[in-house]
Image (tube, grey):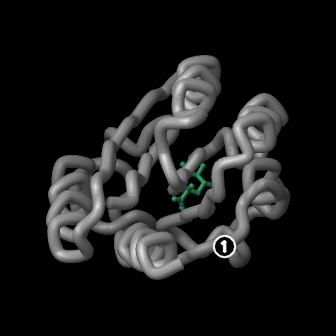
Amino acid sequence: MKKLLVINGPNLNMLGIREPNLYGKGTYKDLVELIEATAKELGCEVECYQSNHEGAIVDKIQSAYGMFDAIIINPAAYTHTSIAILDALKAVAIPAAEIHISDVTKREDFRQISYAGMACEVHYIGMGFDGYVEAMKYFVNK
Ligand code: DQA
């Protein structure tokens, strides 16, 4: 059975409250429930992790080494700033998917660079919560 790790970065615990015009009305709890229901349907194991702290995300990626078949990551704002998260993904070399709920390609200039994305083999951008589901299907069927 495949083991997937889903990592969500800063402020994604505020889903539902935070800029619902951009991120929708679904809460972080709704997202975790969707991911767990999808795992049941697909027949895979999943762990969901959220942190507002860059170093904690680096620690989580490092601890995934040898433990998970794939990482599905929405690094949130750290996407655009964190070489440490990029390096951690490269260090463990676990196949990874980049997720963004909103369509960052149509937003501010400072969101146009994605460091973490450079270590990801697939990208689901602007698909809302469906991006997580599609990434799970991708790794289960791979
Ligand atoms: C986000 C996009 C990022 O630019 C932003 O900082 C986030 C969320 C998204 O899911 O659309 O916090 O990663």
Residue pointed to by mark 1: 122
Residue 140 visible in this rendered orientation of the protein? yes
Figure check: 55 above or below 28:
above
Image spot of residue 90 (x, y percent): 80, 43
Q: For the image shown, how many numbered marks are present on the structure? A: 1
Q: Determine the quadrant in which ligand 1 lies.
A: bottom right
Q: Amino acid at mark 1?
A: Val
Residue for point 45% across, 74% down: 131
- Quadrant of the rendered image containing residue 75: top right
Q: Nearer the viewer, residue 80 or 67?
A: 67
Figure check: 73 above or below 125:
above
Residue for point 41% across, 70% down: 136
Image spot of residue 100 (x, y percent): 55, 64
Residue for point 42% across, 73% down: 140
Which quarter of the image is occupied by the N terminus? bottom left
Which quarter of the image is occupied by the C terminus? bottom right
Figure check: 142 above or below 26:
below
Is 100 left, or right, of 1 in this rendering? Answer: right
